[in-house]
Image (cartoon, rainbow, N blue to C red):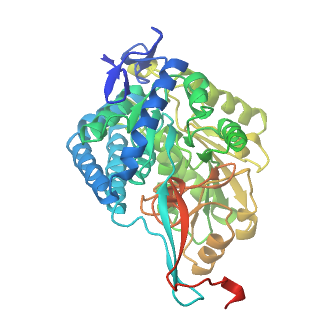
Amino acid sequence: MKKVNNYIDGSYCKAESSKTIRSLTPAHSTVAIGTAPLSGAVDVDRAVEAARKAFPFWRAVPAPKRGEILYRAAENILKEKEELARIVSAEMGKIIAEGRSDVQEAIDIAYYMAGEGRRLSAETVPSELAGKDCKSVREAIGVFALITPWNFPTAIPAWKIFPALIAGNTIVFKPSSYTPVAAARLAQIINDAGLPPGVLNLVNGSGEEAGSLLASHDDIDGISFTGSSKVGEGLLKLSASLTKEISCEMGGKNPIIVMDDARIDLAVEGALWGAFGTAGQRCTASSRIIVHRDILENFTEAFRKAASALKLGDPLSEDTDVGPLINEEQMNKVLKYIEIGTSEGASLILGGRRATGGSLSEGYFIEPTIFTGVRGNMRIAQEEIFGPLTAIIEVKDLEDAIANGVDYGLASSIYTQDVNNSAIAERDLDAGIVYINAPTIGAEIQLPFGGYKKSGLGHKEAGGMGGAIDMFTKLKVIYRDFSGKLQKAQMDS
């Protein structure tokens, strides 16, 4: 069992309180993988103070030099990929193939942001006056609180840490209390790449205490949060009153639209991965399958048959398809939604129970669950569930499919062989990410990641125009007049 400590100002340290968090492996709920401290106000203050003290030095390090440290971090994570992946799978419960993917995403964003050290692009534009030039430059903002969830214990922290660092900010990182061991190992690898003390600090604890203290701290300049819509909306209101930069990536209720001309075999494979990958514990999970009525029967039977063949089991086993849910609370939440779906009149055609038998009884496993006969206004079609449950909704045409609206707008997908259908879908689907002939999961780090409506507030994550670099920098516009005389802009022009 790994004992995790806080990491503040270049040193590992205990929290002020002796209280700890036990990180349990969800496949074997009585087995602890590690412990971490429950940090409070004293610990948060120390970490923020260290980050504030380190900021003037770190922001002055040339961005290409910061990029060299990030590049070393990427190389180090690559060397430790298998070890990290096994920690992720044991602690979070995702199958080992997905654990490796989680770590690979951290590697990818590290390399990408290391390259940003030689870009961090802004603008140089012509002036309307002679003897004058105009440009903008990017500057670091200050000290950021990075608050991350448990479902991607290395990828999501990396999405935030690396752009924040390359931009010249310093960090207080508070990971989920359910996955402290994976987060601590990632932070250690990054710090070991050569970060100066105080640049990346790690504080463990609950969201209710350590997270709230961080978000409301007077010396925190910005917050990057991934988690529930309820918490994100609260943080947004708080940051507005305190004039802090904020980015919130939150929930999803993502549809896969299957048109009558779709390749059913391809759509079934996509729906299987989209609905049951990570046991449905992704903000991009395909929790609604919207199917054209002309192929509804064929698609439903093929999808049910494929889902029934998925193997539940130990996430560290190479032949497991679906792992456990993160904890008992989440398992009970999903089971409650199964009851709700049944009471609303939907037809349960697969699953719907806690999986038991053998070692499955030791963990938080739920059978892959499919409802049919679902109406768009049912709760199981409107609310984020975050488990291996999906709802099949019948529609008569593309317009009907696109009109199946919810409060979320993260990812949407359409399966069709008609280029006109795909063009209409990418134009009209009210989501930040649209996939064509692919499920709602599979974003790449070189483009922005984020959603509309309750799925995202503030800046987006990852790379590309409008991505994380915009979150972690502020633009300064500079006008230089070298004409040697007073020029009055529009009056003189």
Q: Is residue 477 or residue 8 the one in the foreground?
A: 477
Q: Is residue 420 or residue 14 the one in the foreground?
A: 14
Left or right: 285 in relation to 344 = left
Q: Residue at x 46, y 40 (%)?
A: 278
Q: Residue 488: where, in percent of width, then height? A: 67, 83
Left or right: 171 in relation to 384 = left
Q: Residue 312: in sight, yes or no? A: no
Q: Is residue 477 or residue 292 the one in the foreground?
A: 477
Q: Residue 268: where, in percent of width, then height? A: 51, 56
Classify residue 316 by image quadrant.
top left
Q: Residue at x 31, y 52 (%)?
A: 66
Q: Residue at x 77, y 32 (%)?
A: 343
Identify whether 349 is placed above or below 466.
above
Classify residue 114 by image quadrant.
bottom left
Identify whether 40 is placed above or below 334.
above
Q: Residue 384: where, in percent of width, then height? A: 65, 41
